Amino acid sequence: MSDRGNELLRSTIVNMGTTMIDQEIIEKTLTEALKTGGEFAEVFVEDKQSSSAYFDDGKVEELTSGRDRGAGIRVVVGDTTGFAHTADLSERGLVAAAKSAAAAARSAGKQTMVEELVTATAPFPNSVEVLPEDVEKVKKVELLIRADETARNQSSSITQVSARYGDSRRRILVANSDGVLATDDQVRTLFSVACVATGDTGMQTGRESTGRPIGFELFDECHVEELAERAAQRALTKLNARPAPSGAMPVVIGSGGGGVLFHEACGHGLEADLVKKQASVFAGRIGERVASELVTLIDDGTMSKEWGAFAIDDEGRPAQKNVLIKEGTLVDYMWDGLRSRSQGRSSSGNGRRQNYQVLPMVRMTNTYIANGETDPSDIIADTPKGVYVAHLGGGQVNTATGDFVFGMTEAYLIEGGKITAPIREGNLIGNGPEVLNQIDALGNDFRMGSPGTCGKDGQGVPVGDGTPTLRVQSMTVGGTAA
């Protein structure tokens, strides 16, 4: 969008603060929240609208839209937090919620005064050309039909196709007793295709998705026909796949395909709340070598057009690029406002929440391993035997130990330094910190993977992850081959 377009978005969200909730009311709410001796108070206002469409078995199964608006109020005294939320954004409703939050966080100390609110601005990480809310539903459904037709045209073996479209616009305002007053307007658009292929080996699945924090112009950059073709071909390839081997062996993970492993097995362990609880294998290890010297791990909420990007986090802090592991050495954790206050340091812009009804917590944004210098073809050629993983699926991880299990949704054998036969029904089993130390080759082909939703303590937020091609010297593959 042009500079004027971004200004219009900015104006809209600022007006949410000055028209939907007058600044005087915000200040009065914060003052009320501190009357029982609170040390810190915060008002978080959210106005979110969304729409989605689901197409399955040749017909529209679901077409929905919705809007949710409300405020969450937090009061902090030492290690105690009082919280209340309300859908009533009138002065009466906000003050009542402030009193409820304050009742759970009392102190005999002197009442904290609210600092003068100063509007803070942060740059949008990307522009928005076409707001999805302005696009007719029929155009969104047309995308689903095109994807369905393309996928089915790949082969008569494609027996089921489902496609999903989704968009959201989330406008937030954050004000707190430290004088912060910040706003953001977050637009996201998502599309996914899933296919089932049926053959002699039974049913095999393939999935492809795209999503960016931009508007409907996403479909000028990413064509649904290409997504559908890749999803169908992934399912068809697995019809002729061999059962995955078993045992410890070198594993090469393709660019963008394995970021979820490092997000789950390593990233969560670098969140300051888990570190404080001693529920992380990385607790107390700042300054120590925790990975191969090839590895630099970064969390970056400012990445243009990546799924986890935003202007401010849900505590009003500007998004930041945070280096967590630098050349193998642990240099920092991710911080939200609550944990950073207790440590006398600044937040890293990682305070996030699913909606106004819940408290923020430390969360990742776009987490990735930085680019290396090796040509990815040389990594394959230098691997006599092993497994090449193009895409990983879901899995399980224990953040306290780093142990994990992840499914391989697209993988191949490496034989004689070449990628050969596709394999199926396999898992990667290992330990996050051990994998970080076992990385002995890093490609120069960095790429972010598919958009994701990260779950933690019942909350889901949009995140991105990525890697260049990399090789793990030895990892356990759990397959079914004899």
Image (tube, rainbow, N blue to C red):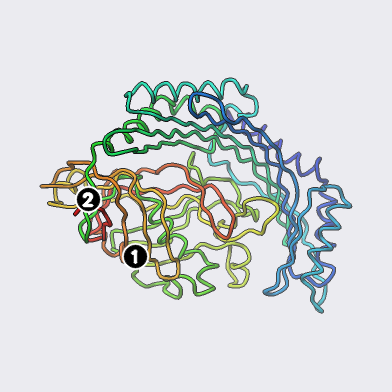
Residue 139, position in %: x, y? 57, 21
Q: Quadrant of the N terminus?
A: top right
Q: Which residue is mark 1?
A: 431
Q: Which residue is mark 2?
A: 387
Looking at the image, which is closer to me, 457 or 337?
457
Q: Residue at x 82, y 58 (%)?
A: 97
Packing grade of label 1 (10 A; few <14, some 14-19, many >=20) is many
Q: Amino acid at mark 2?
A: Val
Packing grade of label 2 (10 A; few <14, some 14-19, many >=20) is many
Looking at the image, which is closer to me, 24 or 97?
97
Q: Residue at x 36, y 43 (%)?
A: 447
Residue 264, position in %: x, y? 43, 57
Q: Amino acid at mark 1?
A: Asn
Residue 342, position in %: x, y? 62, 72
Residue 19 relative to residue 124: left or right = right
Q: Residue at x 71, y 36 (%)?
A: 12
Question: Secondary structure under badge 1?
Answer: strand
Looking at the image, which is closer to me, 51 or 307?
51
